[in-house]
């Protein structure tokens, strides 16, 4: 990858393009050798482009967003300590063969930065300030929630990896610090204050209006997605979040560039290793890069993608390298599904709970209570599982489940496979105990025609009891 910074300077080499903003002059550095050069402290600027374009003073042949210079000015005005910044339109190379590996290296770029400063459009920043100042007893003003819901930064695919990779996070508005703007408020807002404030406000809003988490998601899907991002940033260290959690959050975000930006951000969220790619990537190669990076970390939770499985021998457990989205878009707890490749062509997946199909009888009362508690339908807990299942299916569809409408009943709950398993008798369900939803966990249905055949693996969602009094064990997949 090529790594450059926009740096403050008092001297300008001959024929070097520069920008003068807020009383200081800035030029683009020469490329740094990320392995040997001493890289100065720098901040990353996170913002969204929008549709309108302006002339670029550093790269005249490459138009930039009309929001670029206002965002840079807001940072310069409010953080005099910064003498170097990384900003996409200036620092990403224009040469496609250099540009692509840089885009794949966002985890390195944002993870190495001293701080990340998010510059929102002023209307959105004013909403942020209002929400952070809200106290119990104040009125709820939904107009501010709608302002944030509509903000392009909140729902961008780039937002995820920029936030989760930040060590020190700040927010500003485009007009922050300008005396001429009546709506501006000077100073940067610490990320912790904003993220705490938004989480508290949404929780109080839910209680006041007596709406469920699912109902709030229907009203404000982008804010709900961002609330999950808040949880990831606050509880997970850099690169210590599961691939499944990344897929879950990313699938609810907007992207362009035929899906490549989707994967650039996912790769940036899962690894800080800079890319050495020399070719122009495809969706398939980017998906493979993401899965390979997860495997190198020993995290195999990417198998809980809704994508079709690979048909090659030894790979039938693995998703095809295509658009990878989680079986459901719901926040999960847990760092990873740990896997180890062993001698003899064996993949060991650790801490799985194995359960089997229920041929007769009802699910346990405990399983029913867990499921009905999440749906906020406690009255269903005394009903038959066949009455409960359609209600739960509706909830799954609302969180982007696209699999079979027919579940597999077990003693401990119900499993919803991505594909219908038909009348298959020999079915094991492997539940990923290290990765938990509040209502269950992701899982894999394992179908075998006989002991000699390679198994068929179908990802899905388990709802019910997978925590208490159930033994965990390692499972083995033949990958030779």
Image: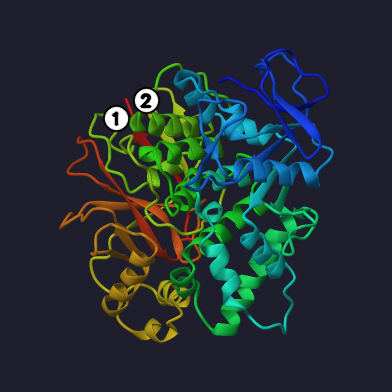
Q: Residue furthest left?
A: 423
In the figure, 479 relative to 383: above or below?
above
**Disc on res. 112:** none
The number of numbered badges drawn on the structure is 2
Residue 408 point in image, percent of width and height: 27, 62
Report helix, strand or loop for mark 1.
loop
Q: Residue at x 61, y 41 (%)?
A: 68
**Residue at left offset 55%, top offset 26%:** 60
Task: Report if the CB atoms under discs 2 and 1 are less than 8 Å apart.
Answer: yes
Q: Position of residue 80 (x, y in %)?
A: 84, 40
Q: Mark 2 or mark 1: name the one nearer the start of the chain.
A: 1
Q: Quadrant of the C terminus?
A: top left
Viewer-proximal residue, 342 or 403?
A: 403
- Residue at image x 46%, y 18%? 97
Q: Is residue 91 left or right of residue 392?
A: right
What color scheme is it? rainbow
Q: Position of residue 361 (x, y in %)?
A: 27, 74
Q: How far apart in space, not on screen, are marks 2 and 1 (Cα)?
A: 9 Å
Corner quadrant of residue 65? top right
User: Which residue has dot 1 on it?
Assistant: 314
Rendered position, 343 above or below 106: above
- Return the residue at label 2: 345
Indicate whether 360 appears above or below 279: below
Depth check: 309 or 150 in front? 150
Q: Quadrant of residue 463?
A: bottom left
Residue 285 image position (x, y, % from top left): 37, 28
Q: Secondary structure at mark 2?
A: loop
Asked whether the viewer can see residue 237, the reply is no
């Amino acid at each position: 990858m090529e790594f450059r910074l926009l740096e403050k300077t008092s001297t300008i080499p001959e024929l070097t393009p520069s920008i003068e903003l807020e009383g200081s002059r800035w030029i683009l550095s020469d490329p740094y050798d990320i392995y040997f050069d001493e890289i100065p402290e720098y901040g990353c600027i996170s913002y969204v482009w929008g549709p309108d374009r302006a002339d670029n003073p550093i790269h005249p042949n490459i138009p930039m967003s009309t929001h670029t210079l206002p965002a840079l000015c807001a940072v310069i005005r409010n953080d005099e300590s910064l003498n170097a910044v990384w900003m996409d339109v200036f620092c990403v190379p224009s040469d496609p063969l250099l540009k692509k590996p840089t885009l794949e290296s966002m985890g390195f770029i944002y993870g190495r930065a001293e701080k990340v400063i998010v510059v929102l459009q002023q209307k959105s920043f004013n909403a942020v300030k209002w929400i952070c100042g809200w106290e119990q007893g104040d009125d709820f003003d939904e107009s501010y929630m709608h302002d944030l819901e509509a903000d392009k930064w909140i729902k961008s695919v780039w937002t995820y990896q920029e936030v989760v990779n930040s060590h020190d996070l700040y927010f500003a508005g485009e007009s922050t610090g300008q005396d001429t703007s009546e709506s501006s408020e000077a100073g940067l807002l610490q990320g912790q204050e904003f993220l705490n404030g938004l989480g508290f406000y949404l929780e109080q809003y839910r209680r006041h209006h007596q709406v469920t988490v699912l109902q709030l998601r229907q009203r404000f899907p982008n804010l709900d997605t961002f609330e999950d991002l808040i949880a990831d940033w606050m509880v997970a260290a850099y690169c210590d979040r599961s691939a499944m959690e990344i897929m879950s959050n990313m699938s609810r975000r907007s992207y362009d560039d035929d899906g490549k930006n989707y994967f650039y951000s996912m790769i940036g969220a899962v690894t800080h290793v800079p890319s050495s790619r020399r070719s122009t990537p495809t969706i398939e190669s980017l998906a493979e890069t993401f899965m390979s990076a997860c495997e190198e970390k020993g995290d195999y939770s990417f198998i809980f993608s809704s994508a079709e499985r690979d048909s090659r021998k030894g790979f039938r457990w693995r998703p095809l390298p295509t658009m990878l989205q989680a079986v459901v878009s719901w926040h999960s707890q847990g760092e990873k599904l740990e896997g180890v490749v062993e001698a003899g062509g064996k993949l060991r997946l650790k801490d799985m709970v194995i359960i089997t199909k229920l041929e007769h009888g009802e699910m346990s009362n405990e399983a029913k209570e867990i499921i009905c508690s999440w749906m906020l339908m406690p009255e269903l807990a005394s009903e038959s599982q066949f009455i409960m299942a359609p209600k739960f299916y509706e909830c799954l569809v609302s969180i982007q489940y696209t699999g079979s409408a027919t579940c597999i009943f077990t003693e401990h709950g119900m499993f919803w496979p991505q594909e219908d398993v038909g009348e298959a008798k020999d079915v094991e369900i492997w539940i990923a105990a290290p990765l938990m939803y509040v209502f269950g966990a992701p899982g894999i249905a394992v179908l075998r025609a006989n002991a000699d055949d390679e198994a068929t693996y179908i990802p899905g969602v388990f709802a019910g009891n997978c925590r208490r009094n159930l033994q965990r064990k390692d499972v083995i997949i033949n990958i030779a």
